[in-house]
């Protein structure tokens, strides 16, 4: 087995054992029963992009392990004045033990990890990666399925702009699942096929969803479209998850969404609130998985 | 001036189909005599033993950014030309995207002033439109008088069809080459990487190949109509090469250059967001790279040019999408070409000399250069095609270090550079 990863920049560098170790540790985590494993550790939450869900989740996770946290937003004086990522990182390095980082530029955490020596946890970078989300998605699936091996997981929607879709695909394929991408050309280029081994692209949603064990719906990221043309009505007609379409998946299929979810767009109200939806479980699991991530990277050697 | 004898070398002068051992005598800044080994008639003041080395007409880099005036924190004419000399170049053509943009005869002259401290010849390429805004043509006649050897809005393609048509027509009348940086920014979006597998993986927006070839296609048609000489800068896609071949079949006067990085590297090199591999045009696919190598061999590509683009560390050590485009290349271009094309690809050295000297001299019309004919200018590049060495960017003569070739091992190294009969770089 490889050494413990020092930073979590993405899923790609991890092997399946490292992934399973984090997921196993996450089972023992519960924010309602705080631990003291990171007592005295200081964690900076460096957010260059707005986020409620991920930031809160990491903050609660860190505090549930006894660590102290400080939140730094891009609107912070020094960053607004034009301080470089390198200088912000170096400044933080002298006063904290780790940085949880969200950034609109793909690869920003990779850059920072080359420039400073403390662990960096990628909390989402541009369209590139969102490893903690992928881990919590896998954790949620494992609450409902014995293993990911052999599962058919279909991801539908705006895959081009989705760091979640990319990280999920890496993780699910590493654990032996069959991943199918589904979406229109403009939101799912053919080049996506090379992302991970064994990926499939199926453009017709009804074919894609057939016999799926997991249906992962994605939001159309309107704020990132930058000139791309999307016909909303056609999108809804072709890619919205409806009760009828969900019936084409396996009976015990679960419906997931990394949030924020736009009802009436990627899924109907009925599907969003149906028994198969595990969206709210994803949120709770997020805290557990992030506790496990922080303890793995920052905790005393077990 | 003194008389120099270059003794025992292997002379390659493709302009006269010469490729054999010979001695060369230089006097008063010109080539005086070419003689069979040991048979030179002239007595020399200085004899250089160049046994085992190639003696070639001075290499000419028709695409460099010297950053002066205006951005001397990146490079100066003095430091850039020192790097050129060390890389075996006797002449460089300086692109006009300085601050201010070189669109005037005064600035064109200023760049060539002795005061700048140039070590090799500097031939300015002037802006084709005022401020490189792509709207109003600059004064081609006066720019040519001031010493401009070509016209280009490098970095900004001339997008307006009619401005491009007029630029070509006017350049043809004045007898200057128009160099186009072929990029439709409406399509490329100014994005930091090639559009393809790697851009998707990295979550970066890409530049489709079409952003280059659409401009190439239009420009070839316009050049054909206006009877102008169109030169396409840093060609990077297989499709552009196809269009050039089609144009030439119809006798359009279109020439092309390629950078060493485009025929050495691919988009794969960007996999760790290393901004030293961020350049414009971006590194393309392996299929494109192979097509470029084939075109270097079959003649579709006429010249190798570095697009030497120095940047300070603070401009490169940032997020990939925010980093400056470009890399330095003057000190490594010859080694990169000899290694990839000659050592690995078995391309004869004669072709490499053509790509670095004979053809570049023709493209920008440098009479008396690009050949070793008796009476021509004594600009000489002496290189060892076999020397194995490792590039160490900390020893660069350039003011900048944004260079992915750092630490790479090469075959082939410039050993001496002679400009107008003066030895400006000597590692003999």
Image (tube, rainbow, N blue to C red):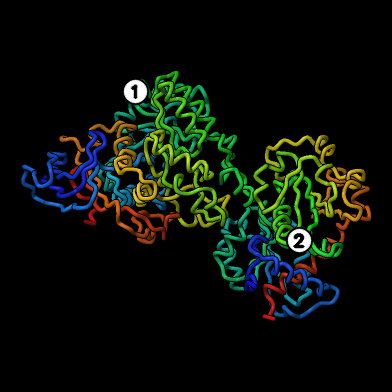
Quadrant position of residue B177: top left
Q: CA distance from mark 1 to mark 2?
A: 63 Å
Q: Quick check: B214 left or right of A48? A: left
Quadrant position of residue A17: bottom right
Percent position of residue A203, x then y:
76, 40
Residue B111 visible, this angle:
no
Residue B351 vs residue B369, the one in the foreground: B351
Q: Residue B355 — which label?
A: none
Where is A134 relative to B146, above or below?
below
The structure residue drawn at horizontal position 44% and vertical position 31%, both measured from the top left corner, is B130
The structure residue drawn at horizontal position 59% and vertical position 34%, both measured from the top left corner, is B186
Q: Residue B174 — which label?
A: 1
Label total for image: 2
Where is A13 relative to B244, above or below?
below
On-image quarter of the C terminus of chain A: bottom right
Where is A246 relative to B394, above or below?
above
Q: Residue A54 — which label?
A: 2
Residue furthest out toward the top:
B225
Quadrant position of residue B63: top left
The structure residue drawn at horizontal position 51% and vertical position 25%, both measured from the top left corner, is B218
Percent position of residue B288, x then y:
51, 41
């Amino acid at each position: 087995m490889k050494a413990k990863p020092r930073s979590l920049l993405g899923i790609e560098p991890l092997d399946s054992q490292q992934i399973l170790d984090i997921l196993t540790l996450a089972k023992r985590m519960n924010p309602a029963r705080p631990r003291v494993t990171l007592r005295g550790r200081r964690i900076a939450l460096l957010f260059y992009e707005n986020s409620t869900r991920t930031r809160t989740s990491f903050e609660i996770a860190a505090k549930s392990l006894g660590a102290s946290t400080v939140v730094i937003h891009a609107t912070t004086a020094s960053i607004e004045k034009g301080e470089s990522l390198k200088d912000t990182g170096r400044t933080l390095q002298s006063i904290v033990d780790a940085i949880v980082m969200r950034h609109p530029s793909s690869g920003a955490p990779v850059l920072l990890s080359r420039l400073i020596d403390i662990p960096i946890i990628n909390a989402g970078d541009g369209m590139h990666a969102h490893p903690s989300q992928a881990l919590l998605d896998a954790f949620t699936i494992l609450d409902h399925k014995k293993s990911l091996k052999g599962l058919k997981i279909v991801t539908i929607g705006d895959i081009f702009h989705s760091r979640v879709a990319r990280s999920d695909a890496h993780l699910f394929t590493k654990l032996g699942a069959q991943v199918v991408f589904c979406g229109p050309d403009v939101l799912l280029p053919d080049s996506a096929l090379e992302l991970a081994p064994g990926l499939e692209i199926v453009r017709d949603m009804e074919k894609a969803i057939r016999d799926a064990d997991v249906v992962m719906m994605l939001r159309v990221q309107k704020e990132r479209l930058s000139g791309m043309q999307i016909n909303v009505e056609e999108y809804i007609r072709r890619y919205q998850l409806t009760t009828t379409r969900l019936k084409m998946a396996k009976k015990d299929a679960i419906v997931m969404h990394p949030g924020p979810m736009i009802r009436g767009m990627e899924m109907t109200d009925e599907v969003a609130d149906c028994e198969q939806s595990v969206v709210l479980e994803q949120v709770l699991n997020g805290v557990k998985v992030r506790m496990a991530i922080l303890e793995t990277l920052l905790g005393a050697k077990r | 001036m003194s008389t120099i004898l270059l003794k025992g070398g292997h002379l390659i002068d493709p302009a006269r189909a010469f490729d054999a051992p010979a001695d060369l005598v230089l006097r008063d800044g010109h080539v005086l005599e070419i003689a069979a080994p040991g048979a030179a008639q002239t007595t020399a003041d200085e004899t250089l033993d160049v046994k085992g080395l190639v003696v070639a007409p001075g290499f000419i880099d028709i695409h460099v950014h010297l950053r002066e005036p205006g951005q001397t924190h990146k490079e100066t004419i003095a430091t850039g030309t020192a790097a050129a000399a060390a890389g075996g170049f006797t002449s460089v053509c300086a692109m006009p995207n300085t601050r201010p943009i070189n669109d005037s005869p005064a600035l064109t002259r200023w760049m060539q002033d002795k005061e700048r401290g140039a070590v090799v010849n500097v031939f300015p390429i002037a802006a084709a439109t005022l401020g490189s805004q792509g709207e109003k043509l600059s004064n081609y006649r006066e720019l040519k008088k001031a010493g401009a050897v070509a016209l280009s809005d490098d970095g900004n393609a001339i997008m307006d069809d009619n401005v491009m048509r007029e630029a070509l027509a006017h350049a043809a009348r004045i007898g200057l080459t128009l160099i186009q940086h072929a990029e439709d920014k409406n399509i490329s979006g100014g994005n930091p990487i090639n559009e393809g597998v790697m851009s998707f993986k990295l979550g970066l927006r890409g530049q489709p190949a079409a952003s280059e070839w659409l401009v190439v296609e239009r420009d070839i048609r316009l050049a054909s109509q206006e009877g102008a000489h169109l030169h396409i800068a840093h060609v990077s896609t297989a499709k552009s090469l196809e269009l050039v071949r089609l144009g030439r079949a119809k006798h359009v006067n279109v020439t092309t250059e390629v950078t060493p990085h485009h025929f050495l590297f691919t988009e794969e090199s960007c996999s760790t967001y290393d901004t030293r591999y961020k350049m414009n045009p971006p590194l393309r696919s392996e299929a494109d790279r192979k097509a470029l190598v084939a075109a270097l061999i079959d003649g579709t590509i006429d010249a190798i040019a570095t697009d030497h683009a120095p940047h300070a560390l603070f401009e490169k050590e940032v997020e990939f999408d925010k980093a400056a485009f470009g890399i330095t290349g003057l000190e490594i271009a010859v080694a990169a070409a000899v290694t990839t094309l000659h050592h690995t690809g078995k391309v004869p050295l004669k072709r490499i000399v053509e790509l670095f000297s004979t053809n570049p001299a023709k493209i920008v019309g440098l009479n008396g250069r690009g050949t070793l004919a008796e009476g021509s200018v004594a600009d000489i590049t002496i290189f060892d095609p076999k020397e194995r060495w490792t590039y160490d960017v900390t020893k660069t003569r350039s003011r900048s270090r944004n260079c992915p070739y750092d630490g790479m091992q090469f075959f082939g190294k410039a050993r001496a550079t002679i400009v107008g009969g003066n030895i400006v770089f000597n590692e003999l």
